[in-house]
Image (spheres, helix red, strand yellow):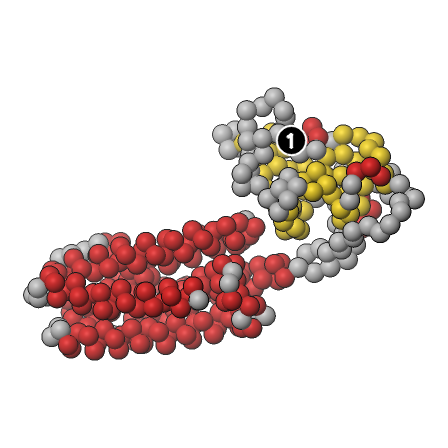
Amino acid sequence: MFVNGFVAFGQSGKNFIAKEDLRLNWFYFDEGEDVMLPFLDNGNHSPNAIHFSLPRDFARKTYLMIDVPSHTSLFLSNKFVRYFDENKICYFSMDSLNAVINNQSPQLTLYNRHDFEVPVEIKIGFLHNTIEGSLDINPIAHRDIDDKADYYKLIILILIAFFTIVRTLFPQELFDFLSFQYLFTFRYTDTLQAKYRSLTKSQSLVIVFQAALLAAILIIVLNYFGGSWSHLYFISSNPLLGWFVIFGIILVLIILKYVLISFISFLFGIADRINFYFIEYLRMTMVFYFILFVVLSYVVINKFYLVQYLTNGLIIAAIIFNIIRMVLLYFKLRRTISIKSLHLFSYLCTIELIPIMIGINFFVK
């Protein structure tokens, strides 16, 4: 994390005396060659991110000038500094940077999802000592984004420990929930049917793990999706606290889901399939959100600056998943119960579609 001392100046360039043009010092990562290559004007590449190793062997009171394009994020040693919605010329004090980074050679990175077609202008030089008027000084003393990243990594670590415990104590139950073979099974043997007669303690522990997993995904999405959710105290103040709160809410919702399944199943005369439906519902949910958790964990740990761009995709993926889950449940139940297709469709709409619509409406508001 950066502390007091890193100062950026934003103003017109007429008071800046350039001593050296460093435009040819930009590099980008070539996936084909798996190596960093110079980002030159005569190349046919258009990278999303370009990098620059900051020089340290310049005179005192020098400044780095960067003409940052619009819609670009600035990083220093992979730490997010600022997002520029519009094109802006910025000046960075080399003395302040050296004091913050302890005379090391960090990497400055510009990221733009729309690609860079030409190298960004970057020069080093001096500012006049007799500048009239005040400068727009932007000291970066503290950033919540770094603190939240640490909380998310702690949540991921706790879930990995939880997963290890469940995997050690109840490997078969966890395998049943994460098995793709069971996920796409439409024919059930008597042995497999026997597993649905009642909920076991081991299955309940796996369900608790699933609730913690889903809560971890939601706490990250709610922080970066925007809206009124991100301003709630238990979410904005401490993500770890928010995780526990959402975890409790999800457990309550899972219980209510079971109650709803039981009530509607009794009305349709298929009470003997309550546990079957509930376990299949949770199995599909576990597989999907476990995959999302792995993807999100990789981004949080390795490329945290991409989290805010990933959340929109996760929401769309979740909506598509709920539709696919309803279709799969239809064919699974079609194989195990003998009621009319119209009644089965009405049954699923009552249990699946209506709660989803209520949830989306509540989430958007």
Could you say which is closer to the camera, residue 272 or residue 171?
272
Can residue 363 be seen here? Answer: yes
Quarter of image, res 177: bottom left
Residue pointed to by mark 1: 119
Q: Is residue 215 left or right of residue 132?
A: left
What residue is shown at x 16% (from left), y 63% (from top)?
A: 345
- Give, as a three-letter code, the residue at label 1: Pro
Q: Quadrant of the N terminus?
A: bottom right
What residue is shown at x 21% (from left), y 60% (from top)?
A: 329
Percent of width and height locating residue 24: 69, 28
Could you say which is closer to the camera, residue 193 or residue 243?
243
Quarter of image, res 49: top right
Above or below, 136 against 281 in this view is above
Could you say which is closer to the camera, residue 250 or residue 101?
250
What residue is shown at x 65% (from left), y 50% (from top)?
A: 82
Above or below, 74 against 251 in this view is above
Q: Is residue 291 left or right of residue 324?
A: right
What residue is shown at x 15% (from left), y 77% (from top)?
A: 266
Can residue 179 be seen here? Answer: no
Quarter of image, res 48: top right
Q: Is residue 214 left or right of residue 187?
A: right
Percent of width and height locating residue 165: 40, 67
Percent of width and height locating residue 257: 29, 73
